[in-house]
Amino acid sequence: MLSHTAQYALRGVLHIAASPPEGATRAAETAAALDVPEKYLARVLNTLAHAGVLRSRRGAKGGFRLARPAADLSLAQIVAPFDAVGNAPRCLIRDQPCGSGEPCIAHAEWHAVAESVRRFFQNTTVADLLAGQALEDAAPVPHPSGNEAT
């Protein structure tokens, strides 16, 4: 459902949010903790900083922090720079948006599922996830090159 990049973004933000509040979390530290490629994750985190999800700081005491409280940061805001979770769902049958004007045979069921997913991303915050599940339990995400990041 989400691209590997969006999954890395979610995992990276969750790791940063779960880190001690004093000081920033470095991309290298986050990549090592999540067992993902450091350069790739650094680009993802920098994109999130430009989007206002994270704050970044260079230098010896540099790294990343949340730009706002975890309770005010929805999953939709994190994945928005990478995936269009909230947009009209693509048709499962045809290569176009699925609309009510000429609905495909799967439209009614697929639209309900897509709307449920959209609501989940809009209404679920980083704080909600941190309160409900330990990050160590998260499944590894394969690297976009096809090599598993385990």
Image (cartoon, helix red, strand yellow):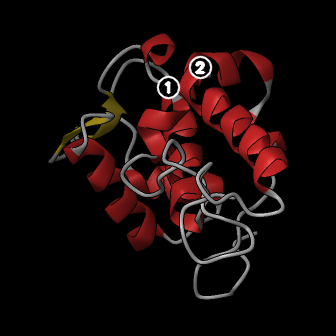
Residue 112 lies in quadrant: top right
Residue at the spot x=76%, y=61% of the render? Answer: 140
Residue where numbered disc 1 is placed = 74
Q: Nearer the viewer, residue 3 or 119?
A: 119
Where residue 132 sits in the image (x, y, percent)? Answer: 78, 19
**Residue lying farthest front?**
101
Residue 60 as seen in the image, left or right of residue 24:
left
The answer to whether residue 4 shows anywhere in this view is yes
Residue at the spot x=57%, y=26% of the render? Answer: 18
- Of the two numbered discs 1 and 2 in the rendering, the one whose residue sits closer to the viewer: 2
Residue at the spot x=29%, y=25% of the render? Answer: 67
User: Mark 2 is on which residue type?
Assistant: Asn
Q: Secondary structure at mark 2?
A: helix
Where residue 138 sits in the image (x, y, percent)? Answer: 78, 46
Mark 1 in CB contact with mark 2 (< 8 angstroms): yes
Quadrant location, the N terminus: bottom right
Circle 1: is it few (<14), some (14-19), or many (20+) Cα within 10 Å?
Answer: some
User: Mark 1 is on which residue type?
Assistant: Ser
Residue 85 as seen in the image, left or right of residue 61:
right
Circle 2: is it few (<14), some (14-19), or many (20+) Cα within 10 Å?
Answer: few
Count of marks overlaid on the render:
2
Residue where numbered disc 2 is placed = 123
Where residue 79 sits in the image (x, y, percent)? Answer: 48, 46
Residue at the spot x=66%, y=65% of the render? Answer: 91
* Residue 14 vertical placement versus 30 (above, below): above
Q: Nearer the viewer, residue 88 or 85?
A: 88
Q: Nearer the viewer, residue 108 or 27?
A: 108
CA gap, disc 1 and disc 2: 7 Å
Sooner in the amino-acid sequence: mark 1 or mark 2: 1
* Residue 72 vertical placement versus 63 (above, below): above
Q: Secondary structure at mark 1?
A: loop
